[in-house]
Amino acid sequence: MSMQPVYIAGEWKTAQASGEFHATNPQTGEALPETYPVSSWEDCDAALDAAAKAFAALRGLPAGAMSDFLEKYAVCIEQNAEALVSMAHQETGLPASPRLGDVELPRTTGQLRQAAAAAREGSWALPSVDTQTGIRSALAAIGPVCVFGPNNFPFAFNSIAGGDFAAAVAAGNPVIAKANSSHPGTTRLFAEAAHAAAEEAGLPPGTVQLLYRTSHADGERLVADPRVGATGYTGSRHAGLKLKAAADAAGKPIYLELSSINPVVILPGALRERLDQIAEEFTTSCLMGTGQFCTQPGLIVLIAGPETDAWIETMATRLQQAPVGTLLSQGVAQNLAQGITTLREAGAELVTGGEPQDGPGFRYQNTLLRVTGTGFLTNPAALQTEAFGNCSLCVVAKNLDEAGQVLASLEGNLTGCIYSHAAGEDDDAYARLEPELRLRVGRLLNDKMPTGVAVSPAMNHGGPYPATGHPGFTAVGIPATLRRFAMLQCYDNVRSDRLPLLLRDKNPTRQTWRCIDGTWTTADVGG
């Protein structure tokens, strides 16, 4: 079968390839028939040139052009939903229903429409006017954005359709999408829909482009190129830090979502009150998507006692009885096995699981490990190894003081949760532990497992390193996500007719919130 073309400068072109690859059906372990190129630097260079030209042209388009594109793109995706769901199911093994078709695809089109609305309304840009000094400023597009998508969300975080893509485009930037090798066919179908929407919206060629894979060296060169404005990356810590080093050396912004074990603290009163309910919630969260969520609860902190022993025993039984799901790829299965090995070598004891699952495709037994708080504190770095998949580690502290020491030793995470007694029995314990956990997570939850990530303006899907590369930004939640891909542009004594519309005296939308002389308002300047 011939090699699939790349999408550069508005056209599907034969790749200048340095190699080729196939996606794999993780349910069977067999390679899928389509052949995809590993692009050489020539493809990257051509895409960068086209993106730079598109960026110059986009600045001259009407303010609503990007919003029109995003809305048309959402419609095109919905019109091709059946093909997208079928392809993604083949490439990832994720259930066609409800996961892909009923949950993730609507979330994806919803993100695109929310981003379009934010771009049209304009308040995301934080326009500020100081009439006393004649200085005005607002955020504006930063330039071509490279987006590297992860393997675990083929729709909602796809490099050419997901949250980073939507935010970068809504902020006014062209995007060079680097597909994830686990689902190149899904990404190709998105690119075809994006092509149709971009043509209908009248966007310049090069606004949206697609490469399937590059060498590691070319990926690092890409994010550091002078023509790039910024990069969004979701994936492994190892690969992300290499890209970050390259981007940092060139002074280029890069926003990373890397790794997280999402600690969950379960206090004794909560277990006495509702042990079975918490066990059911944990089982669902731990095994959802075979544990391949960036918010999967990989670390459970408990206080020693009969309730904790009973809960761990209950969890072992539940995990043994639960079906074993499909992992996304052979690489995920290998990394999961290696992560579990690392945890055991560091002192964790196996409670249940711990072996590959017999059968076709990529599967690993549902796994639960246990270590004492003292044992954890002797080797906290190794015992925070992310075993990405259907595995969690219980840390049993001897008392609250030791539990606090465990939390104080944690790296940064996306989420953290504390389960406590509903009637206040655990309130003192909560007050002692919450301050330690709060500083180490981007999103703090109470009495709720962390796997759901709502697309809400108040959401923070970020956190201290190594959960992300910067604790002040989020990968989910519009309009905040747009600000990652923008630069602050200041105008000092610039004539009114030369200012961007958002900074002129008249509010161009009548809805945009602007800070005028220290007060947020939708009024005109002087109005």
Image (spheres, grey):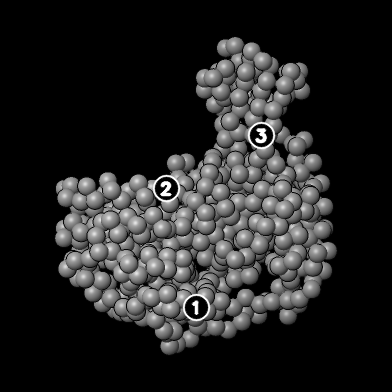
The reply, left or right, for residue 379 in relation to residue 487 is left
* Left or right placement of residue 76 versus residue 356 in this view: right
Q: Would residue 269 appear left or right of 247 to someone viewing this image?
A: left
SS under mark 1: helix
Q: Position of residue 496 (x, y in %)?
A: 73, 18
Instruction: State the residue position of label 3.
Output: 488
Dot 1: few (<14), some (14–19), or many (≥20) neighbours within 10 Å? some
Residue 367: image quadrant is: bottom left
Nearest to the observer: residue 57 or residue 343: 343
Any part of residue 158 in sight? no
Total numbered circles: 3
- Local SS, label 3: strand
Find residue 361 and report its horizontal and vertical position in percent.
50, 83
**Of marks 2 and 1, which one's residue comes earlier in the chain?**
1
Residue assigned mark 2? 439
The image shows residue 124, relative to residue 398, as above or below, that is above
Q: Residue at x 78, y 49 (%)?
A: 227
Question: Which mark identifies residue 431?
Answer: none
Determine which residue is flagged by label 1. Answer: 338
Task: Point out residue 134 in the picture as x, y percentages from the top left corner.
Answer: 68, 16
Disc 2 element: loop
In the displayed image of the protein, which residue is found farthest to the bottom? 358
Judge left or right: residue 373 versus residue 187: left
128 in relation to 342, above or below: above
Query: Residue 250, how many percent across, how many down?
Result: 74, 51
Decide which of tag 1 and tag 3 comes sooner along the chain.
Answer: 1
Q: Are marks 2 and 1 in contact (CB under 8 Å)?
A: no
Residue 57 figure quarter: top right
